[in-house]
Image (cartoon, rainbow, N blue to C red):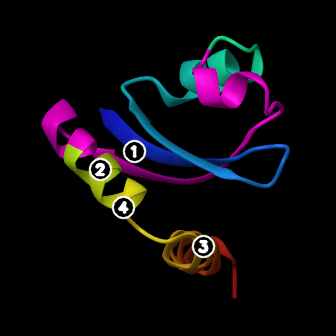
Amino acid sequence: MNYTYILKCADNTLYTGWTNNLEKRIQSHNSGKGSKYTRTRCPVELVYYECFQTKHEALIRESAIKQMTRAKKQALINAASKAKTPK
């Protein structure tokens, strides 16, 4: 499985990436080894992710999310959060 994900950094910025091992990648980010961007913005929190069968699909979605405005990214996060909230 491949994932496209959004992290909320300690400075309240959002980081988008992809991985084939979500748990390991989040640990990597929080240990300061995940990416240059998140290295100085730890701790990070996973706020959104999508699953894909192929790396190619995950990379395409990562690119699309990176082109979104912060407001659109936040709307995506909020919609997913509402969908997971029990009624």
- The disc, 3 or 4, on the residue closer to the chain's N-terminal end is 4
C-alpha separation, residue under disc 1 versus residue under disc 4: 14 Å
Residue 11 vertical position relative to residue 54 in the rendered view, above or below: below
Which residue is painted at 71% across and 53% down in the image? 13
Q: Which residue is mark 3?
A: 74
Q: Which residue is mark 4?
A: 67
Local crowd size for mark 1, using a 10 Å CA cut-off: few (<14), some (14–19), many (≥20): many
Q: What quarter of the picture does the N terminus occupy?
A: top left
- The disc, 2 or 3, on the residue closer to the chain's N-terminal end is 2
Q: Classify mark 2: helix, strand or loop.
A: helix
- The disc, 1 or 2, on the residue closer to the chain's N-terminal end is 1
Foreground residue, 80 or 6? 6
- Asked whether disc 4 touches disc 2, contact meaning CB atoms under 8 Å apart, the reply is yes
Amino acid residing under circle 1: Thr
C-alpha separation, residue under disc 4 versus residue under disc 2: 6 Å
Residue 32 vertical position relative to residue 74 in the rendered view, above or below: above
Amino acid residing under circle 3: Gln
- The disc, 3 or 1, on the residue closer to the chain's N-terminal end is 1
Local crowd size for mark 4, using a 10 Å CA cut-off: few (<14), some (14–19), many (≥20): few
Which residue is painted at 56% across and 78% down in the image? 83
Q: Any magenta on residue 76?
A: no
- Asked whether disc 1 touches disc 2, contact meaning CB atoms under 8 Å apart, the reply is no
Image side of residue 3 versus residue 44, left or right: left
C-alpha separation, residue under disc 2 versus residue under disc 3: 16 Å
- Asked whether disc 3 touches disc 4, contact meaning CB atoms under 8 Å apart, the reply is no
Q: Nearer the viewer, mark 3 or mark 4?
A: 4
Q: Which residue is mark 2?
A: 63
Image side of residue 42 versus residue 53, left or right: right
Amino acid residing under circle 2: Ser
**Magenta extent:** 34-59
Foreground residue, 30 or 54? 30
